[in-house]
Image (cartoon, coloured by chain):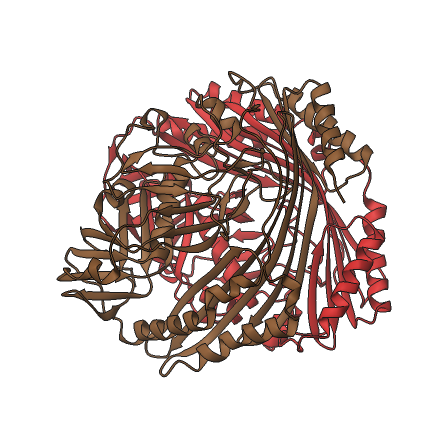
Amino acid sequence: MKNSHTSIQDLVEYSVKKALQEGFDEVLSTAIHTRESMVRISNNVITIAQSRDSITLALYLTKNQRIYFAEHMVKSREDIDRILQNVKSSIQLIEPSEFYAPLPEPSGKPLQGLYDSTVEDYLYKVPELGDMVIAVGANEGIDRIAGMIRLGIRHRVLMSSKSSSVLEEKRSFVEVYTRAFKGDVTGHWAYTSTRLNVEKVREVALKSSRLAREYSTLRTMKIEDGVYEAILSPLVVGNILSYLAMMASGLAVLLRFSIFSKYGIGSQIASEKFTIIDDPLNTELPEATGFDEEGVATKTKPLIERGIVKNILHNSKTAKKMNTESTGNAGIVMPRPWNLVIEKGDLSEEEMFSEIKRGLFVVNNWYTRFHNFEEGLFSTVSRDIVIYIEKGRPKGLVKRVRIADTIPAMLQNVDGLSKTQYDIRWWEVMYPTRAPFIYVKRLHFTYVE
Amino acid sequence: MSYIDILHKAVDRALEKGAKYAEARYHKIDSFSIVLRNGNVVALTTMSRDGIGLRTYLDGALSYSSSYRLDSESIDYLVENCISSARATTRRLKLKRDPSSPRIVGKANYSVIQRRKFDSVSLEDKISMLKNIWINTSKALTQAKLVNMTIEYQESIEYKELITSDGAEIISTIPRILIQILMTLYEPRKGSIQRIIGFGGSGGLELLDTWNIVDRVTEEVKNLENVLIKGVEPPKDSVDIVLGPELVGLIVHESAGHPMEADRIWGREASQAGESFVKPEMIGKERIGNEHATVVDDPTIPGSFGYYLYDDEGVKARPRYIYLNGVINEPLHSKWSSVLFNTESNGAARAMNYECEPLVRMANTYLTPGDMEFNELIEDIKKGIYIKNFMEWNIDDIRWGQRYIGLECYLIDHGELKEPVRNPVLEFTTKEFYSSIVGKTKRVEFYPGLCGKGEPQQAIPVWLGGPHVRLKKMKLKVVPL
């Protein structure tokens, strides 16, 4: 494949220069070149091998405090000329935006250590990793395995009209998840990193297979709707807290589609044992970056620290609107978290189980939906095994229960975290997340037979 | 510019290199959006995505490669990459035959006509129309305040050229409009109530005339204020349930459309969108509900959000009777899944953009209408609840157990709608729902959605629809507040 370095840098530099010549006040240009390979697995076979090669150019343009955002597949300078002419004719016709803020000085610097050449080496050998995952499932005695392995290289170049130089980062990323079946008992696990460690890929298949196999002999049972103790696996923690982190975006707060429009900075929203951090500087997690989408330096910061809301995530626009500073979390349109880290606790995973009197261990979930974002009223459905535990011992399997509660109630009841953490991202976890197992002493569950 | 020659070249090269089946698609989507918050324009946006995707089938190995580059050298590389990925795949699913389906593919060039073209109305007039939604709704409230109303108005044009090795040659142009409105109403003593409303279809600006947006949203806002201020707790005993078309559309999408996607029944989505309670041996035999339970998925409804005449494998589209008179009837198929089920594709393969392989997808899914008026549906209900729409919902990964929380809801007392009700929770299984229908109204209404599936995740435009439906008595649950 051709090297894209020169071309995307040229597109970015040209677009900034040309936009200023065309009379725009400010321009921010970002080009992203992604090369990616993936296999999907189901029923012990690779159902498809996929690869993609794409370049997008995102232009943020302002004129007299009016805002235009254009994201296009750009192949040449002429494409940029056409986009700018189109924007020029429209931008004058709208009013100044209430979200306008002057572009900030690009204070960020590229983060080192994001690229692993092993990922590049394996980019066209992903089917081999798929074969390995299938073999692990067979060796572990499960009936069938499904999953996905994705490897990729992303090259990002950013230039602001506030600076004469470009910022660029090249990163690799790895995302793996598998679901193993023993009869209709299923286990699931996931892994993500900027680096490829084949042993970690194997571990994902092992962990999902063992979850399915080890609990497959438990009897299936029903439960009544009500309050139970709960152990939530890192997959469940990653899913629910990715919604929490999304709601920490300053734009979500301003649009009142956020729990943080009710629970502002300084509110006690969780138990003292709970801390969640936005960690863009952790180079092991794939969304790590030294500069946000406005070129501002990123920093590691707690969203919630020892139960107290500490930070809302801002770009320059939401920061101005809320009378504060950018947190280095632009999103041109919507501020966003980078990588999430939930602080670990001091419990072993075995201790967490042994101390349950009457509770449920939930391995995985999906379909999290909110009835009211301000109240944090939500439900989510388990998939894969849910184990009913009594007096520290697994008593049975419960199929497809629902957690139906509010986010503050759930977080207030966090009463223990494992000392182990796992780096995960999958279909249902939006952001790379380093999460422990979490013990919640009271959580509402519902059950449909 | 036409890419047909390039696509032919890619398909021919793939066959030369050993593929038994190949399809190549140029796929472009252009969109333009206006975003407003509380009546003020926040920003304008444009997006454009185009490129070529190639899928090949080679001795059991399916592979898909895509590229934004359209030059000859890049196409050669695309073919090489696709074939080498297939060859590198050792754990394959060897089909009884390759997915070629020459009998059912077509050659066509079709467009959805914009009777009023996107550019026939000025940007200022479009903005003015959108501002009117805010102006009218915000002043309609008397006690609560509309603290946020975000409107995203989007015009898009999807253009595709498709060539397949079994003879399809399809060119299509489908313009669409989608309007999504997010609202929060707030009253200090009662808290907030939130709603997301969508309007969507294929066509031009004439769609706006049919949607009557200002009146509908204004009425909704007034009704939501009533629910927020005066809403009572849901009844605790079993009551008759009446559901509005928006909720019925969602239920049939989730519990009929999804579980009847053949790739999901086989297990191809096991680790993503999930599997299905439906097993191959149930098809054509197993009863899932009563005689009212007929669910159709029809891509050919004019003006629909999920409209198409040929799918992304070149197969002619037609209505599919998913559940028929209460029996599990016809799954949705692509060429690939139809080989596994020893049948023919029924034209359900769709791809979100050039970067994605076509998957088995719904188009416009609805519960068929009945023969009643709304007042006839409720006239003999002594005690019941009418759930018009919803916010929270979910369903498990085999599409069996599901939950919906009503948003705008009313008690029914001796055949009349009475006090508003807050947050009634419905939880039931798929069979329970389709076995509980006792009446349907005459008119089907449709709502737009973007349906997710696959890896990479693909969001596909669909319509979800149905009539008003009455269910026999059920017990409601409550929210944990």
Q: Position of residue A53 (x, y in %)?
A: 71, 40
Quadrant location of the N terminus of chain A in the rendered image? top right
Identify the residue at horizontal 24%, vertical 49% (top origin).
A225
Q: Position of residue B460 (x, y in %)?
A: 53, 47
Expressed as whole percent of the image width and height from the top left, the position of residue B66 reads 68, 37
Viewer-closest of A163 and A230: A163
Q: Is residue B439 above or below residue B12?
A: below
Q: In the figure, is residue A146 to the left or right of A51?
A: left
**Residue B441: horizontal and vertical position, in percent?**
28, 55
Q: Quadrant of residue B447?
A: bottom left
Q: Nearer the viewer, residue A369 or A351?
A: A369
Res A177 seen here: yes
- The residue that appears at 54% across and 63% down in the rendered structure is B206
The image quadrant that residue A369 belongs to is bottom left
- Image quarter of residue B386: bottom left
In this rendering, the answer to whether A278 lies above or below A204 is below
Q: Is residue A324 visible?
A: no
Q: Give the colour in which the image draws chain B.
A: brown
Up/down of B232 relative to B95, above or below: below
User: Is residue A307 left or right of B170 when viewed as pictured?
Assistant: left
Q: Quadrant of the C terminus of chain A?
A: top left
Chain identifier matching the red colour in the rendered picture = A
Residue placed most toward the observer, A341 or A318: A318
